[in-house]
Image (tube, rainbow, N blue to C red):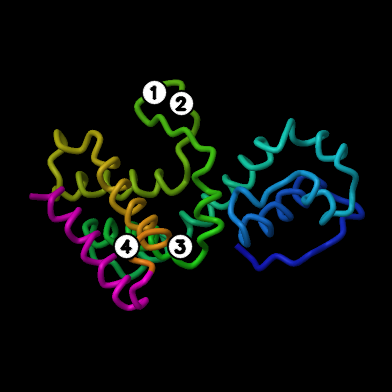
């Protein structure tokens, strides 16, 4: 996601301008920093103009969260570039998730403030991009024969819980007092432990 700067809206895509202003606010302060009045002030329009594109503040936050999730998944996939196999790619997805959270704590909090993922439901909305990246990595384990097909169902939940919980501990719990190198070593150990348990 490119660096965003304060800009006044004059013409073009107001919806996109509102989302970008929302990204600026949430990057600095997480989801609680997002207020329609502040967003429209940054863009240079009246608060009523936002309602032509978003029903309310929650609708804008959902759009901002989707943008953050897409960028997060892209960064997760970038960690896979040097992975030699499906196991390495799953490890990279997990570490990419944690790395994003550590680098962009405001966006990380905003990204998961509105989602409802129901991957087992036939009428579910598309999966959040980070979860979709994890699902793809797990499916690749089955394709390569590293994970039996009958053990695949639901494997995304312990994997996601581990990296999400670790990120929360690193941002808001006792891990935040540790040096960055120690946090990262603990992140690697956490991801390795989950994968080892999954494949045991």
Task: For mark 3, give the secondary structure.
Answer: helix
Q: Residues within 10 Å of mark 3 (few under 14, many from 20)?
A: some
The kind of secondary structure the magenta stretch mainly shows is helix
Find disc 1 in the rendering and name its residue.
121
Residue at the (76%, 49%) spot, across then down = 18
Q: Residues within 10 Å of mark 2 (few under 14, many from 20)?
A: few
Query: Which residue is label 4 attached to?
Result: 92
Q: Which residue is mark 2?
A: 124
User: Which one is nearer the viewer's eye here, 21 or 150?
Assistant: 21
Q: Residues under labels 2 and 1: Cα distance?
A: 5 Å
Q: Is residue 164 left or right of residue 148?
A: right
Under circle 4, the secondary element is helix
* Residue shown at 57% from the left, 45% from the top: 66
- Residue 77 sits in quarter: bottom left
Looking at the image, the residue that sits furthest to the left is 200
Q: Is residue 172 above or below residue 153?
A: below
- Let me know if residue 69 is in the magenta part: no
**Magenta segment range?**
177-200
- C-alpha span from label 3 to label 4: 12 Å
**Residue located beneath label 3 in the image:** 100
Structural distance between the alpha carbons of marks 3 and 1: 28 Å
- In this view, 125 is above or below 158: above
Q: Secondary structure at mark 2?
A: loop
Mark 1–mark 4 distance (CA, rounded to whole Å): 27 Å
3 vs 4, front mark: 3
3 or 1: tag closer to the N-terminus: 3
């Amino acid at each position: 996601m490119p660096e965003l700067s304060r800009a006044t809206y004059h013409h073009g895509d107001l919806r996109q301008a509102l989302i970008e202003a929302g990204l600026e606010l949430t990057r600095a302060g997480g989801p609680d920093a997002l207020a329609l009045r502040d967003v429209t002030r940054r863009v240079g329009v009246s608060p009523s103009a936002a309602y032509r594109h978003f029903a309310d503040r929650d609708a804008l936050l959902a759009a901002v969260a989707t943008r953050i999730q897409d960028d997060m998944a892209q960064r997760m996939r970038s960690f896979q570039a040097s992975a030699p196999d499906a196991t390495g790619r799953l490890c990279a997805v997990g570490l990419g998730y944690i790395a994003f959270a550590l680098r962009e704590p405001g966006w990380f909090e905003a990204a998961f403030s509105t989602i409802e993922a129901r991957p087992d439901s036939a009428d579910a909305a598309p999966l959040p991009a980070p979860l979709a990246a994890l699902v793809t990595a797990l499916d690749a384990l089955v394709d390569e024969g590293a994970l039996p097909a009958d053990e695949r169902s639901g494997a995304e939940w312990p994997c996601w819980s581990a990296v999400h919980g670790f990120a929360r501990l690193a941002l808001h719990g006792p891990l935040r007092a540790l040096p960055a190198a120690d946090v990262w070593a603990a992140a690697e150990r956490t991801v390795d432990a989950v994968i080892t348990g999954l494949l045991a």
